[in-house]
Image (cartoon, helix red, strand yellow):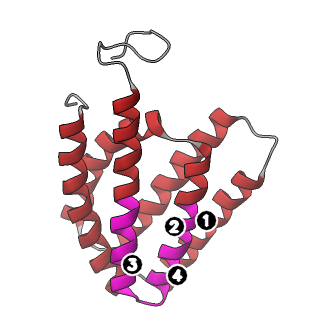
Amino acid sequence: MPQMDEQTVQDLFNLRVILEVHAIELASARINAEEIAYLKQIRAQANELLQSSDISQDFTFNRFFELNSMFHDTIYSATRSRVLIKVISNIRAMVLSMRSMSIRLDSIREVWDEHSRLIGHLERKEKTAAIRLIKQHVSKTASQILLFIRSKPSDNTDSAGLATL
């Protein structure tokens, strides 16, 4: 895995936005009713989790990542493009390692609001609106990660003074 400095994050997310836009273009035309229903089911699980007050924060974050991956995997699958799915999977592996370091509970709520709107755009075949939203979605993620990187001490220690890997 490459060093996650600001330039690497910017390069990675510049590439990711291109791939995500292409995925949305394809999925907008190819997604079926069963896939839309599954996206709604995932969203319902996320909403239930976010409304629960008796679940630990670690569990919430872990389950969020699982549901988020299921959500995006469903959209990627709807592209019907094996090559695109493989390329995006490789990029996502790098992104997820960074994303887990920078996530906050309030941003999880915002992500699922965006996911809800994206479902609506896909269901109504609103490709232009879906593309605009996915660009915004990816940009926000990149900004959160960049803020996290900028807030860390530069001497390979984290905010608690522990060595980072």
Label 1 secondary element: helix
Instruction: Of the two numbered discs 4 and 3 on the same chain, state the one appearing first in sequence.
Output: 4
The residue under label 4 is: 120
> Could you tell me which residue is drawn at 82 percent across and 41 percent down?
54
Residue 120 makes an appearance in the image:
yes
Label 2 secondary element: helix
In the picture, the quarter occupied by the N terminus is: top left
The residue under label 1 is: 43
Question: What's the CA distance linking mark 4 and mark 2?
Answer: 9 Å
Tell me if label 1 and label 3 are in contact, CB under 8 Å: no
Tell me if label 4 and label 2 are in contact, CB under 8 Å: no
Q: For mark 3, does the 10 Å Cα neighbourhood hold few (<14), some (14 to 19), or many (20 or more) residues?
A: many
Q: Which mark is residue 115?
A: 2
Instruction: Of the two numbered discs 4 and 2 on the same chain, state the one appearing first in sequence.
Output: 2
In the picture, the quarter occupied by the C terminus is: top left
Tell me if label 4 and label 3 are in contact, CB under 8 Å: no
Tell me if label 1 and label 4 are in contact, CB under 8 Å: no
Question: What's the CA distance linking mark 2 and mark 1?
Answer: 8 Å
The residue under label 3 is: 130
Q: Position of residue 117 (x, y in %)?
A: 52, 75
Closer to us: 149 or 78 = 149
Residue type at the position of mark 3: Ala
Tell me if label 2 and label 1 are in contact, CB under 8 Å: yes
Q: Position of residue 61 (x, y in %)?
A: 59, 40
Tell me: 102 left or right of 84: right
Residue type at the position of mark 2: His
Q: Position of residue 103 (x, y in %)?
A: 50, 41
Residue that lies at the very extreme toward the right in this rendered image? 54
Residue 76 makes an appearance in the image:
no
Instruction: Of the two numbered discs 2 and 1 on the same chain, state the one appearing first in sequence.
Output: 1
Label 4 secondary element: helix
Tell me: 45 left or right of 145: right
